Amino acid sequence: MSLFPGKSLPRIFLVLLIVFLWWSPGHGGDAYSSEPGYICSVQFENDFFGGGTDRHFTHGTAVNCLTQPIPWIVKAADKLPWFASEKGIIDQERPETRASISVGQNIFTPEDISRTDLIEDERPYAGWLNVGLGLVANQGSRRYDKIELNIGMIGPWSFAEDVQENWHSFFNLEEPRGWDNQLKNELGINLFYEQARRFDKKSLISGLEYDFIPHFGGSLGNVFTYGAAGFTVRLGPDLHEDFGPPRIRPSLPGGGFFRTRNGFNWYLFAGVEGRLVLHNIFLDGNTFRDSHSVDKKYLVGDLQAGLALQFHRYRISYTQIFRTKEYKTQESPDEFGSLSVSCQF
């Protein structure tokens, strides 16, 4: 779903922001206020940030809201495997568990959207409209856990065809002509889990700090089944209880949680993740009905880099993502961008 023909616009914008922020003064940890309340994030991912293409994972939109920490949710989460609080941690780093509610839509297309016939060696047209219910726990700056159940529709009932065709018509873009070949209607159910841990942050010159955040996770269901592991490195003047901005899965972990601060803050981040993919319905085709499919690659990697800005109770971030080939007849890797805006209430 492409708006711009070139690759330079987001990169130039990102470079200018980095140059500006490098000279911006940081603020101390005491600038942070008390425990935040509800946090809502809007995410927008599209391949027009990746060179003006219109292929593969071409668009994703998601809205996610975190509740305040609720005592009964904290107690329930403490009984879940891997979610239990660690013994001996100091009071301010006890887990604060929140409920997570989300709604999202992903759109996938082959590379050539001008053709009306079925393109055998390219991935199917497909959409995924889903809602998610989950638990998110931050143990201070030490650890982040998230478990989420997503339920939704794949196929025409995902309304991906309507969204892409109306979007392209509105912006006078090329009409996608192959949606008659999309995956069939199917109920999708998926359980995601991810955990990230932070090593102690270290100081650099000019008041800058960096930290190292390894992670692991996975997914189980008829939409995605995979295991994943990787790490993220952040650099900024004041790194606090933030494990990175949210992303649309499959992806490196990130969360809506961040702590309100009295002023401006920023950080740069970069990370990698490798996934062992056992099932991807958008490549393998429908589970219970005959449909188009391609031979997927079992090992897929993501490389990402970006920038997060925070001012008082608002956070905005941009991430550039590079993804290796996902199926055997794919001609080249993918590149796309992710923009997220979060606000505390």
Image: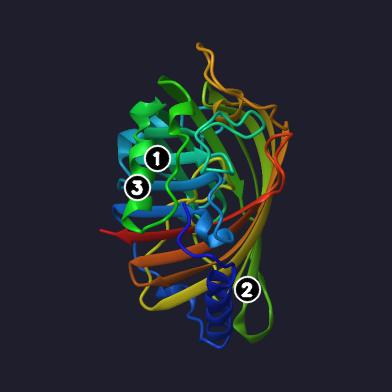
Q: Which of 234 and 54 is in front in this view?
A: 54
Residue drawn at point x = 56 percent, y = 32 percent = 82
Question: Residue type at mark 3?
Answer: Val
Residue under label 3: 63
Question: Residue type at mark 2?
Answer: Glu
Q: Measured along the vertical axis of the image, is residue 266 above or below residue 115?
A: below
User: Which numbered disc flags the more N-terminal residue, 3 or 1?
Assistant: 3
> Which disc is residue 105 wearing?
1
Task: Assign a secondary structure to mark 3.
Answer: strand
- Farthest left residue in view: 345
* Residues at discs 2 and 1 in contact (Cβ within 8 Å): no
> Which disc is residue 209 wearing?
2
User: Which numbered disc flags the more N-terminal residue, 2 or 3?
Assistant: 3
Residue drawn at point x = 57 percent, y = 39 percent = 110
Q: Which of 218 and 13 is in front in this view?
A: 13
* Residues at discs 3 and 1 in contact (Cβ within 8 Å): no
